[in-house]
Image (cartoon, grey):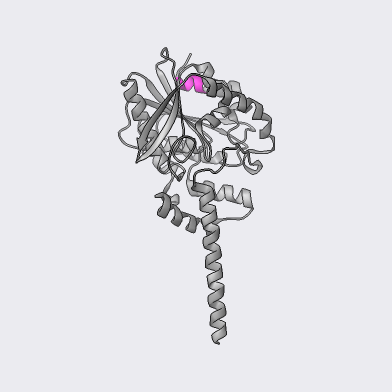
Amino acid sequence: MEWVFISLAILVFLVISTYVWFVTITFGLLFRRPITKKQVYLKPFFGEGFNQHTEEIEKTQKMFAEKKHIELKIVSNNVVLRGNLFENPKSDKVVIFVHGYYSTGMRDIGYLGDLYHDLKVNLLIIDQRATGNSEGMYSTLGAMERFDVREWIFHINNRYEGKKDIYLHGISMGAATSLLVTGLPNLPKTFKGVIADCGYSRTNGVLLYAGKRLVKIRPRVLIWGINLFARLFAGFNVNKVKVTKELKKNTMVPILFIHGTDDRFVPFNMSVKNYKAVTTPKKLVAFAGAAHCESYLKNKELYTAEVKEFLNVK
């Protein structure tokens, strides 16, 4: 009988230690600062045909890297954040571009081709916390980033003395972050709108959906441990980042939703849920056959026309 108890104890220890090991690895991969600068398009998320856009994406990235810009820096919650401002003194609008998960601003701007080069508005491309040139150890999938983006709005509003209209254009996690911002208090009157391209409706939902596509399992058993680590080390609760819930607090900010119908990372239906939660002026534009982050690359004319109308740019 003694050997039975010892065997059970060893078995329990092995199960628990294996679980903790899996959670530790998974948490690190999901939330810690990226360990590589290489741009990767995972086929389960971006689709088989996304590599066809690589040349165009890299051309846009190079164009912005070589354009004259001003390097800006702010501090939010004791984290130093950095961005690049491309000014056009003739424009009365500023668009803050908010990049997606595990990426950087100057990388993800490549998904938008010549859009902002053609629109000729002031453009601020930021690096979110724990990415690119910004500091920080952990990404929080919008939980903390929303306050960072609000600080950027304050900074731009002060820089231009409240004389320019401010918009957010977020893509993927950047879209969800931008939507979360609309539910925050004390936003300046110059904050005029959000363009949300393929944003998710809740963090735990997109983790479960993406996890199933990537490893072919339902990783619900890992979510509990991952959330515990997120609360202990990164200071946020995965289960409480609910974009649709926060959108109901938005009483002033118009929103343009954009989403590809063939998105394999963030399901199109998540934008539908977000759209339904909004009571301010809103519009949802579906891009037929577009994968994750592919809407502009799939249909430049429609994308440009919708953004121009939303920004009221001639």
- Image height of 99 relative to 70, above or below: below
Q: Residue 113's x, y, as percent?
A: 58, 24
* 27 to 304, vertically: above or below: below
Let me know if residue 194 is in the magenta part: no
Specify whether residue 190 is in view: no
Left or right: residue 41 versus residue 255 is right
Q: Nearer the viewer, residue 258 or 228?
A: 228
**Left or right of 15 on screen, residue 163:** left
Find residue 234 and report its horizontal and vertical position in percent.
Answer: 42, 49
Q: Position of residue 207 (x, y in %)?
A: 53, 48
Q: Is residue 22 visible?
A: yes
At 53% from the left edge and 18% from the top edge, which residue is drawn?
Answer: 117
Picture quadrant of residue 291:
top right
Relative vertical location of residue 55 with respect to residue 21 in this rendering, above or below: above
Give the extent of the magenta segment. 307-311
Q: Residue at x 63, y 25 (%)?
A: 56
Residue found at the far bottom of this picture? 1
Q: Quadrant of the N terminus?
A: bottom right
